[in-house]
Amino acid sequence: MTVVTLIRGFFSPERVRSALVGRGLMAGTVTAASFGIVTPFCSCSAVPLFIGFIEAGVPLGVTFAFLISSPMVNEVALVLLWGLFGPWIALLYMACGLVVAIVGGLVIGRLGLERYVEDYVWPMQGTAGPSIEFKLTAEQRLGDAWRYTKDLVRKITPYLLVGIGIGALIHGYAPTELVAAIGGRSNPLAVPLVVLIAIPLYSNAAGTIPIVQALLGKGMPLGTTLAFMMSITAISLPEFIILRRVIRWQLIAVFATVVTTGILGVGYLFNVLVS
């Protein structure tokens, strides 16, 4: 986490905005999705980030590519997945998350949905002032990274404990037959079912990892389990409620449909590749 934080120190929100302004839809979308990996923000940051990007003149599709990638693919999820399942699964998860973010951003950008952004947001466009860069020494950057790591561990520990508790309940008390009936390979609707179950929930990626491990221990396929994890972090109902402050339900519905379709594809892909 400290190493990733050191890298992320060179990608402040202001610098990300500046890097995305003026790019074409394809280049901007790919860049935004890639930035999302090293600049993970939770759903509570969605509104200020959205407004900040619009202020800077970043296209709508590019903005959504970042909003999809940032919570779905982050350093905590990758480190934990790497440790639990090895580098192949972690890197494939990252690649799939990027594809979902890029395709989602491109689709939303092509549909011309700007009319579904709340009217008060557009007058802000072009009002973002120039970003101020502060030169930090290597020692200052290392100190900041270490402080952030300690703060991050402190913040995610409650989520991890809750996740471990839920995972323990699933592992110890959830009937194997029930888990198999809902998410087993014999159920062709397993992936969409777990996505529907996940939408009302919300957690960060770290909090879902212990649940993922418990579900896998019960025999749920990896693709179905990862679809559950991605849905909790990327298309949760609390995030939709927060985003409603700046965009209308029509755009939220398109956003949810595009991302859900991508997650379903990822789930079925992993189920085929990892048997």
Image: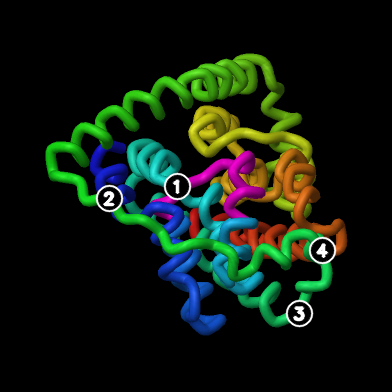
Contact, CB < 8 Å: mark 2 with mark 1? no
Q: Earlier in the sequence, mark 4 or mark 3?
A: 3
Mark 1 surroundings: few (<14), some (14-19) or many (≥20) residues within 10 A: many
User: Which numbered circle lies on residue 100?
Assistant: none
Q: Position of residue 41 (x, y in %)?
A: 52, 45
Residue ID at (36%, 56%): 132
- CA separation, marks 4 and 3? 15 Å
Residue ID at (61%, 74%): 59
Contact, CB < 8 Å: mark 4 with mark 2? no
- CA separation, marks 3 and 2? 37 Å
Q: Secondary structure at mark 4?
A: loop
Give the magenta range: 37-50
Q: Is residue 42 highlighted in magenta?
A: yes
Tell us which disc is closer to us: 2 or 1: 2
Q: Secondary structure at mark 2?
A: loop
Please name whichever residue, 180 or 116, is drawn nearer the observer in this view of the structure.
116
- CA separation, marks 4 and 2? 34 Å
**Residue annotated with mark 2:** 134
Q: Main secondary structure of the magenta part?
A: helix
